[in-house]
Amino acid sequence: MWSVLNKIFDLAPPLLIGVAVDIVVEREGSWLATVGFVSITSQLFVLSGLTFLIWAFESLFEYFHKLGWRNLAQDLQHELRLDAYGKVQEMQLAYFEDRSTGGLMSVLNDDVNQLERFLDIGANELLQVSTTVLTIGAVFFWIAPEIAWMSMLPMPFILWGSIAYQKKLAPRYRDVREEVGLLNGDLAGNLGGIATIKAFTAEAREVERIEERSDAYRQANARAIRLSSAFSPLIRMVILVGFTATLAFGGWMAANDELAVGSYSVMVFLTQRLLWPLTRLGETFDLYQRAMSSTQRILDLLDLKPTIRPGAQPVTDELARADLQLDGLSFRYASSGDVLRDLNLVFPSGQTTALVGSTGSGKTTVIKLLLRFYDPSAGTVRLGAHDLNELDLASYRSHIGLVSQDMFLFHGSVRENIAYGRPDATDAQIAEAARIAEASEFIEALPQGYDTIVGERGQKLSGGQRQRLSIARAVLRDPQILILDEATSAVDNETEAAIQRSLERISVGRTTIVIAHRLSTIRNAHQIHVLEDGEVVESGTHDELTAQGGLYAALWRVQTGARGAQSR
């Protein structure tokens, strides 16, 4: 509404110019004289008052329409980004393994921003151009209906040309959005791996690779620009033909006293007011087509259906203390063969169970299935009598504390990272979790202690420090199920021994599942399973397995022998 009113008042000044010409030429016979303002003075006062009011209202409505459109654009941008991000978070882990972070960022940021730009500028422009055409058309038909049809003659050609251009532009802008997604993906990957690039002196090679990707994006844009740039000149020529005829014929009528000079003046000025907005349609349709290409990518994302759907059964503390079981479990990734084959395992409640084996034997895959990051290809994962598919995922995972070998810390303070799984924790509880994880000493030595910013992915800390913060995070959550995936892989022997003592204390009464390459960290586990090629080849306690003289015993001899060699 505000856009329409703003444009109507914006188009009023040419009418005022026509009235002014009419006053000067016709004097006491002017149009204002016919409505009761006979003297020239009174007519000029009325004209001045109308001019002030029209400009004031035009400015007021411009403020309102800008406020409305920009707030609408920001609100929609905000809601759409949240919906898209929420959908991304619902997706299964496999979805992220097939896509780059930069590509997803392109959708969540660049594509959402393209839609915001159109709503902020283009949507209002389309509405105001429509108002301009209708208002000026009505004025022309009111002033001189016998020539008004000339002003409307270009309109069908403009509409036809606009639709034709949209159809041709659509695939070109889809290519642009695809290329910018690939470019963002490469940039995000390179920034994340900047240390590796520097270590392998690959800077020049990576600049060349980004140059190729950026050039592909530039070429895609150039193909779209070549087509979109031709729109405005072509439309201008179509408009020019119609309005040249209108102005020439209108001038001939005015010269022959068939049309009032004031009316002709209105037509002259309104011609310009109609011409230039229509020539800007090219830019508006360019914004529109970019926005539509981005919107399609956003809608494609919102239409995705996660393959892992949560069940309805909430997980109580009592249920979380039940045994975890793998029954006839088999699993394969989409891009590989079988990783696990007909696996049958029990992780007894309140006990510590360890998984060991060579790299690629399937240990970490078992953890991913227990967390239900993936569903098995065959068989089931159970908590007590319940298949994980029956359980509410958020409720189930809230009872799990995970310390992964991929230690991810968020850009924030030490305190915020430890409290990530329990944001309502007190400072005393955070400090106690840090003490148990053998992290309090190095934290207190940091410049701002618990308020020290760790940097993106914790890059300001050493690997061992990051690992101890991850352990503190899991400890603070106080879970019924504790999963340790190489939890001490990045610490020295002394810290490992200290952390091991802490983990032995906190694992009491919990279902604890440990993956370890360092066999010393799991020698006190209640049960140890040795995996090889996705199958359990040995099971038992540490003493039983070393006595068997099998694969576990061989690994134990290698590790203890290595330690002996180092001590010598």
Image: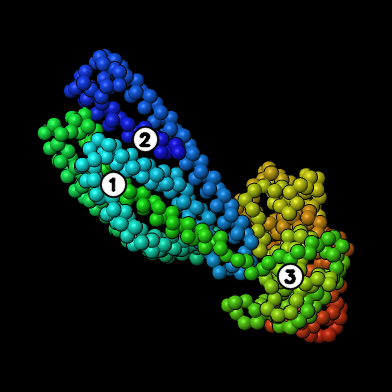
Q: Residue at x 36, y 32 (%)?
A: 9
Q: Seen in the image, is 308 located left or right of residue 48?
A: right
Does the CB distance between marks 2 and 1 fall below 8 Å? no
Quadrant where the C terminus sits is bottom right
Question: Compared to 237, does 550 lie above or below?
Answer: below
The residue that disc 1 covers is: 279
Gap between marks 3 and 2 measured at Cα: 61 Å
Q: Residue at x 21, y 18 (%)?
A: 28
Q: Seen in the image, is 188 located left or right of residue 213?
A: right
The residue that disc 2 covers is: 8
Q: Nearer the viewer, residue 201 or 349?
A: 349
Whether residue 189 is visible, yes or no, is: no
Disc on res. 23:
none
The residue that disc 3 covers is: 389
Snapshot quadrant of residue 88: bottom right
The amino acid sitting under disc 3 is Asn
Does the CB distance between marks 3 and 1 fall below 8 Å? no
Gap between marks 2 and 1 measured at Cα: 19 Å
Q: How many marks?
A: 3
Residue 146, given in percent of the width and then of the height, sits at 21, 42
The amino acid sitting under disc 1 is Thr
Q: Nearer the viewer, residue 157 or 126?
A: 157
- Name which of mark 2 and mark 1 comes first in the sequence: 2
Q: Nearer the viewer, residue 102 or 556?
A: 102
The amino acid sitting under disc 2 is Ile
